Image (cartoon, helix red, strand yellow):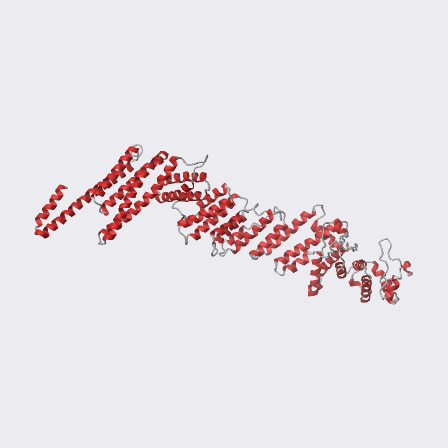
Amino acid sequence: MSRLMRRECGMVDLPERPTDADVFKYSAMGIHYEESAYDNAGLEAENSSVHPSWAFANVYSSPVVRSVFTAEQFMRWSQIVLSHLRGGELHKAIDVVVTAGDCSYSCILSAAQMQTVAEPWFNKTPLVPLFGEYGNGETDHAWAGNERRLDNLSQLYEDSVALSMSSEGQTTAGGLDALIASVLCGNLEVMEPAFLASGNWRDGLWCHLRAALVLCFSKVLMSAHHSVQGPYGVLVERLTGSHECWQEETARAVVRRLAERLKDTYFATASLEELLQMRVILQFLSPSEADWLNLTEELQNAAHDSNGDRVRLISHLLLCLDTAYNEALHSHSVQIYNSNLAEALGRYTEHLVQLPHCDPSEAMRTVIAMALHLRDASQRASVYAAFLIACRRRELQNATRQEMELLEAKLVQMFCKADPVGEVHDEVMRLLNQKIEPATMLTHNPTAEAVLWRAMHADSSEDFATVLRHAMEACSSFWLAEPHAELDAITDVASIIQRTILPNIHPSVGGAFPTDMEVAEAHFWLVFAQLRSAADNHARITAQLDVALAGCNRTLVFQLAQEEAALMRELHNLVCKVLTYGGSLVRRVSTCVTAVSWLVQVFVEEAVLSVRLASPSKSVMSEHLHHVFTLVEQMDVLGYLERDLLPQQSAGELFAAVRALRMACGQKLHDQLVEEARKVAAAQHQLFGGLPSATKLMAEAVGER
């Protein structure tokens, strides 16, 4: 019935395909020819009207290639293929073209055949369809012999090799045929030169991966008991090996060849974006112990990038990869083999500060979020320190040092709360003390700067008590520094004690609260800084008063005289506190007794200035002398003047200042008496015109003195 229908529709009736055991039997078709008389030539010459199926039977029985077909044979062979297709028997058409060795038809027909979960390779291997012919795993198509795909690949390989070595392959059409065949079968030797000619690294990468994919696909099918004959099978075995663990070694070999190709050909000339893309791809393809993300050289080159785009790109990439590792999206950690992430974040934070209208607090939140990715405490500390240094360098251009100190204290507290690891805080302080530039220091000494950082990092009464002890030790070391005391550094630390440390120390049960002696010593250094500042102000006001006395602005003279007197009273009150609090310092560091004597000496010297320049009255000079002698007596009573305690040089300088005050007072009284005598003589001369009487009065006045 079906044969009759085919004849009526004009289709060619085909014999059944011969098997290995039973080659085409003509008797089954009702045709009996002698074997010796039945050949291709006789069939064309003598029996031209024979049915096409019988005419092509002998050709169909043995594999041939299209090149041996005559035009008429090829037409008849095509009719056979088309008849199978019209009859809905695609698998038979594939068998015909594969057996005939026609590569193009074979691949086209195989590509038209849908693959399903019923395929043997699908059930036996973990593969996915190679050529993209998905059946969604839900169709009802039965298996249709897709093991022919290996035959297709073998034919394609032989065609690609033959074309590449022939003159036909040098033509445009022939070269394109060879390239298409090599892409389909994974012939890298033919495929790679054509793709590399484009100069695009993605093409070179793709052809390597494509070749590896096809060869591994073929290898898995061969392992599933499908044999591949001829050169293609040899190629697959050569590139994949014949042992059981061929997958890992093949993967390593593919990645190694690909890495060599990319590194030798593209790394030197690619842009940073392309270079990072290549490195990431190689990292994902390589085993977990390989490290393609060592970007040390790229970071060094990025240091010369003024706008920070390169280091920003590297930082964001490494952060994304680190996040992917933390979420188990891939097995390589960018923090295990190198410190590129920490270095990149450190440099990125420096550029972040330079952004226009960048708010330091908002930038600090960003820095904290990035730094918390780092598992190493020292690396997190390096990022925080880099940001603080860069922020200080920028903000000092427009802000005062006190404003900068308040801002930094806020920034430090932000990361201390977000990252409450003591090791991080200690490392930040160490890095800041090590890397801070002298021009950007907020204090006059690195040790004072260290005290400042400690105070910024403290967040409890116990912490501030510890910082207070460090501050007092720093002050005593500043005073004993050689060749001379670092007075400005003492003032810096005293300011830190007053503004930051003492206000944050609150008594607590069982807490490390400072002792009374420590509190007294802290107040001594506060008085030290206050007295020094008051002495500087007094010297300035006294000099201005001396100039004003030579003029005629009585209002200014009165104002300056009032300020000078107030400063002398303040100095006296402060020097009295020095004697009160100084004992606690001397008990801890006996050599610091010179600080007490020096402060008393400063007061005496300011009294000398007051006497010489401010023209005080007799009562004021008497008051100054009384205060000084009283202070010296108190020093003696309190033991500051003990021979074994106070060095002879310091004692000599103190008493020399006292003698200078006595001499200044005597000289000032003498000058005042002489001036008064002159005034009296001048008055008498105007009244009586008697100059001798005036001279006599002056001499008498000097004699009385």
Residue 594 lies in quadrant = top left
Residue 167: give x, y in percent of width and height. Answer: 71, 63
**One can see residue 656 in this view:** no
Residue 621: give x, y in percent of width and height. Answer: 22, 42
**One can see residue 591 in this view:** yes
Q: Is residue 174 left or right of residue 680?
A: right
Q: Is residue 285 left or right of residue 119?
A: left
- 80 up-or-down from 230: above or below: below
Q: Quadrant of the C terminus?
A: top left
Q: Which one is in front, 366 or 483?
A: 366
Q: Count the marks: how many? A: 0
Q: Which one is in front, 364 or 386?
A: 364
Q: Quadrant of the N terminus?
A: bottom right
Residue 124: give x, y in percent of width and height. Answer: 75, 49
Q: Is residue 223 left or right of residue 563?
A: right
Residue 312: give x, y in percent of width and height. Answer: 53, 54
Residue 523 lies in quadrant = top left
Q: Which one is in front, 234 or 669?
A: 669
Q: Which one is in front, 305 or 345?
A: 345
